Amino acid sequence: MTKKTKTQVCRAVSKSSFIKNIGYNRKVKTLIIEFANGNQYAYRKVPEDVFKTFWEAKSYGYWYNSRIKGEYESEKIN
């Protein structure tokens, strides 16, 4: 499922066993990831082009571990 508005893009990710959902708030440049275990994290100051590349990645888990984890300020949100 994909939902688009001016400030946010969200979609349920079913092709990954590691990441359940990803979303992005363009207004505040925040990437939100819900992991398969239910934990949700917000990653701050993520450029939109980074989100778009992540969105199109063949492997969300690999891309997350190599390009997101530890690269951006993060906060557990649930």
Image (cartoon, helix red, strand yellow):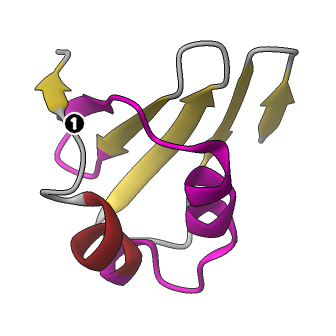
Q: Quadrant of residue 43?
A: top left
Q: How crowded is mark 1: few (under 14 residues within 10 Å), some or many (20 or more)?
A: few
Magenta segment includes 40: yes
Which residue is tagged 1? 38
Q: Which amino acid type is marked by label 1? A: Gly
Location of residue 18 with respect to 61 vertically, above or below: above
Quadrant holding the N terminus: top right
Left/right placement of residue 31 relative to residue 25 reads left
Q: Which residues are the magenta region? A: 35-62
SS at circle 1: loop
- Residue 42: where, in percent of width, then height? 30, 28
Name the residue at 67% across, 55% down: 49
Instruction: Choose top left, top right, bottom left or bottom right for residue 64.
Output: bottom left
**Left/right of residue 46 with respect to residue 42 in the rendered view:** right
Closer to the camera, 26 or 37?
Answer: 26
The quarter in which the C terminus is drawn is top left
Residue 61 drawn above or below residue 1: below
Residue 76 x, y percent position in the rendering: 13, 24
Could you tell me which residue is drawn at 37 percent across and 41 percent down? 33
